[in-house]
Amino acid sequence: MRLTEKEEEVMQILWDKGPLFVREILEVYPEPKPHYNTVSTVIRVLEEKNFVSHKAYGNTYQYFPVVSQDEYKGRALKKVISQYFDDSYTHVVSTLIEEERLSISELKDLIRKIERGKK
């Protein structure tokens, strides 16, 4: 499931800082800070999407990620590759080379690293 830009911002804060209360999340934002209710709404949506959970402290909640950043990146990459590259990782690599975002020498270095890792 893809997150909105605002949802990704909040997730990034939680991934970087760990469990936080909404007011602590707000403290991390640069000026102009979003409204408390805006962040609170984003957190509730993230909880509905099962990206975030909370621990209750009286009538306030401390939120924490239940999806790791690596897991989210992996899901997002799979979706992009499926949606735009016909589920072909080879197509992704060839596109990167064609658009000169990855050189042949970089690709060879990557292959060598992978081969060393498999030994």
Image: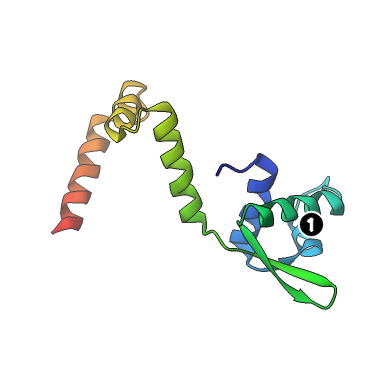
Q: Quadrant of the N terminus?
A: top right
- Is residue 22 shown left or right of residue 48? right
Q: Quadrant of residue 3?
A: top right
> SS of the residue at dot 1?
helix
- Height in image: 87 above or below 30? above
Residue assigned mark 1: 26
Residue farthest front in this picture:
48
List x then y, in percent, for residue 49: 63, 52
Three-letter code for the amino acid on which mark 1 is drawn: Leu
Comparing 33 with 53, the one in front is 53
Relative to 24, 82 lies left or right: left
Position of residue 42 measured from the top left corner of the image (x, y, whole percent):
74, 50
In the rendered image, the quadrant that contains the C terminus is: bottom left
- Residue at image position (65%, 57%) is 13
The front one of 100 and 95 is 95
Q: How many marks?
A: 1
Residue 31, given in percent of the width and then of the height, sits at 81, 47
Give the x, y percent position of residue 43: 73, 55
- Name the side, left or right, on which 103 lies relative to 24: left
Name the one closer to the observer, 13 or 60: 60
| Neighbourhood count class around disc 1 (C-alpha, 10 Å): few under 14, some 14–19, many 20 upward | many
Determine which quarter of the picture holds residue 40.
bottom right
